[in-house]
Every structure is written in structure tokens, then in C-alpha cells.
Amino acid sequence: MGRLQLLDCTLREAPIDNLMWGEMNIHKMIHGLEMANVDIIECGFLKNADYIKGSTSFQRVEDIIPFLKNKKKGKTYVALVDYGRYDLKYLSEYDGRSIDAIRVCFKKNEIGLVLDYAAQIRAKGYQVCVQHVDTMGFFDEEIIDFIEKVNEFKPLAYSVVDTFGAMYEEDMLHYTGLADQYLSKDILLGFHAHNNLMLADANAQSYINKMSAHRDVVVDASLFGCGRSAGNAHTELIAQFINKKHEEKYNIDELLDLIDTVIASAQEVTSWGYSIPYFIAGIYNAHTFNVKQLLKRHNIKSKDLRGIIELLDDVQKKKYDYALLEKLYVEYFDNPVADALALEKLSNTFKNRNILLLAPGKSVAAEKEHIQKFIDEKKTMVIAVNNVISGYQLDYIFYSSTNRYNLRKFQECAPETKVIVTSNIQGAIEEDTTVVNYSSLIKFGWVNLDSSAILLLRLLIRCGVEGVYVAGLDGYRSAGDTFYKNDLETGVEDKDRQELTRENTEMIADIVQTNPEFEIHFITQSEYSKALE
């Protein structure tokens, strides 16, 4: 049986801004992992940026020394570098006081350069480990060819990495089996899993069972799965598995103490773990940044998220081209229609009329008397945005959200109220509904580029309307309720409200600047009134 080692990568993998753990927590973590008898402790990143105390993103190995005053015999202390993102001028000669080894990860286009870089690290006295970013993104022939060069280089370890958490057991066995077949037995074979498909621990355990019987292996994990997006294999679960099935060597109580203290404090400032969006990223072996960007559109459904990611080719799935995502988002939902006659009819209806855009903010209830008096005095045509707004006589309701449109069946609405929908609305559309092109109302450059009120303003301009009054478009509050009815709340987190308000303000300002003949008048208080300044 080969030697089986556990590497904990919590201090590097954590989704904490700037890896700002705090000095005391770093001390606790390293000491606790030592006491738990974890074999390899990854202390953090090496990066070019100046070091900030309390972070595990280090510039120089000397920055790590204060945390390694009492290095334990038999343990290996490591840090990771991204090839091309760390200038080796910052790397001092090895003197035994800091880390012992440096792990170098690299992308597909860097495969021909990384070993020269690794050689420069080893020339300074450090052991070196090498690992792909996204092993599944390499052809078998590329992996075999690289491993032959690795055998000549003889690093401490070579690892297979499931970067996007997309490997099923047969995938893991294929890539680790390929490495096992061609990698010299005197080089550690490693495996690093992510948990998008909830398979990180199962794959790690299967890997251990398959490989440790005949060669030295290392498996990466993090406490409580702590890691960006869906997280990693769990150190405590893998340690318990090894204790139970292979060799009693790890102190589980020490790991649990770290989870109760250090990891619990991390959970107060960040989060990680399995979710449907990360599951979708795993299905397509796609970068989670693509998913996160699309999730900023807060009403997107999981099936639509999946449909958009599916439109990306294999290369695009690994990148994060946000302009491309915007384009695909619009194309995915668009269902072009010939709307010239509809626009002409609306233009004739709106001609020479005072129009009130009525949005469902809290002010439509709080200032109802004022709004109704305005409607009566100005004899306005009232167009509600995305909702049947109770207590008002509505001439039209404009829908650009399928979710909101589907709520109509549960709401009371006067039979004379007409409906306008954009062509992205999915499902059956009622008869006598006016349908206008969705994509013709879109302007790129913002994340929430299809905000319903913005699309309605652009539709009015297309119909030749010269101005509009606005009520109920209050803007997202920094906290608390935004809509006049609680069941309309969209679940936007407080941290995103300010960004949504900023984007809507910018889009309204853009409408005013590009259409100077079009006047907007807010008759209730609105965060967006500053767009008119």
C-alpha cells in the first residue's frame, strides 16, 4: 500500500475578500491542522500585490514566517501560485523557516511554459508541485505528453483538478487512471475536487480507494468544504473516511474545533456550498463566474440559466465574457414578432394624451390620494408596470416579465384594461394582447438591461410620445420593503439594492440624454429623480 496524505487548502480556497482571515484565525488554523495531524497544510496564495496583515494572500515567503514559528516535523507547508501571476523576484531562497513547497497551477495555453517557471522555483530550494486548471479541458494526448515531461522534471507532486466540479466517478477514474498509468511512481499523484455536483467527497473517497493501494497519493480538501462557489471536498469527512477505512491517523476533534471557531467566524462574512446555479455550472464544466453574472438578473429561472449556459461553446464556458452573456441573454428570451402595426395602433392611441406610468412602489399606496387627484385633473391615461395595481383604474398594463404576467390569473382586473407584452413573455398569451418586440427595447451596457420600467419608457418613445408622468417608481430601498404589496418583493438582497438603483438611474439618464425631446416628470418621490438633474 502506498502512502496516503491529506492536504488542507482552507486558508487559500476560502471565498473571503482578499483572504482576510485575521492573524489570530490564521494562527488557530495552522496550529489546529497540525494538532489534527493533517499531512500537508496550504498556507495561502503567493501573489504580486503588497501583503496586508491578516490575509493569506502573501507577497513574500517571509510574510508567512510569523505563522510557522513552530513547524512540526513530518508536516509539509505549502503555498500556491498561478503561473504568470507571481513574479519570482519576490521569492527568496529557501531557508527552512517558511513554506517547504510551492504548488503551481496553470491553464491550457501555459502548458509549454510552466515547467521552466517551476524549475526557477526549485532552483531557489523549494519543492514544487504542478497541477492543471481544469484537467477535463485537456485532451488525453496533451496530458500524456505533459506527464512525460513531468517525469523528467520530477516534482514533488502532480495533481488532477476538477476545477468546475463537473466530474462524475467515471471521469475522475479516467483522468486519475491516465495519470497513474504514465506518472512515475516516485511522484505523488494528487486529486483536487469541487462540489458543484455534490460529488467531491464521493470522488475523493473513490480516488483514495483506487489509487492508494499501489502508489503514494495526496487528496485535497477544506474544512466544512470551505471554498469559492460550491466549495470543495470536506477535510473532516475525508479524514474520517481515511481513519475508518484505511489508517487511524487524524484527530477529528481538532478539526471539529476549527469548524466551530474559525470556520464559524468565516460563515459570518461569506458563504459557499451546493446550489442549483453551481450545479448548472458543473453540468456544463463552466466557470461559475458566468453563472454569477447571470444571477445578477434576479428573476432569472434556473431552467433559463441552464439554457443560456448551454449556448456557450466549450471555450466560452471557461471564460467570463460578460458582453457575450448579455447578448445571449437577450437572444435566448427574444421571440421576434412583426410589431409595426401594433406600434402604429399604440401611437394613435397615445397621441396627444397625458400618460402616467404607474409602478408598484410603496408610494402608490402611501400617496394614493395625491396620485388619484393628479389622474383626475390631468385626465391621464394610466399604464401600470408589470402588475395589476389595485385601487386604480388602469387603461393598460405593460408586462416584460413572464413571472409577473402569470400572476394576472390570480389578480382582479377590469375587463376594459388592455395588455401590452414584450415578445420574451413565455407561454400562452391571451387574445387581444398587444405584443411588441423585446429586443428592440433593449440597450446593452447594464446588467439589468431589461428592467420593465425602462423598457416601457423606450416603448413610449418608439410610439412618438413626447413625455410621461411617473408615480410609484420609488427605487430600491437600502433596507425594508420596496413594493406596495409584500408578495411582490423579488428577494433582492440588501447588498444588491444600491446597485440596481444605480443602474436604473443610469438608464433613465441615458434615455433623457439620447432623447432630449422626451420629458419625464416624477409626481411621487423617487430615487431616480437624480437622473434628470
Image: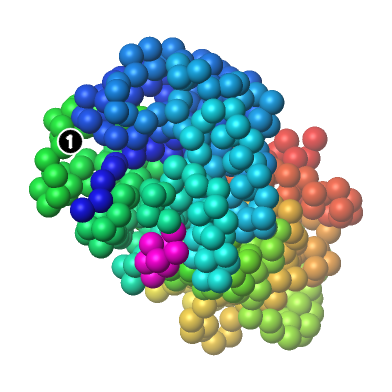
Residue located 38% across and 12% down the image: 69
| 118 sits to left or right of 19 | right
Q: Residue furthest right?
A: 517
Residues rendered magenta in the picture: 174-183
Residue located 57% across and 56% down the image: 149
Q: Nearer the viewer, residue 287 or 372?
A: 287
Residue located 25% across and 55% down the image: 212
Residue 90 picture location, percent across and down: 65, 24
Is 425 rendered above or below residue 458? below
Residue located 78% across and 40% down the image: 532
Residue linked to disc 1: 250
Q: Nearer the viewer, residue 217 or 270?
A: 217
Q: Amino acid at mark 1?
A: Tyr
Predominant SS of the magenta segment: helix
Q: Is residue 434 visible?
A: no
Residue 80 picture location, percent across and down: 51, 37
Residue 135 picture location, percent across and down: 50, 60
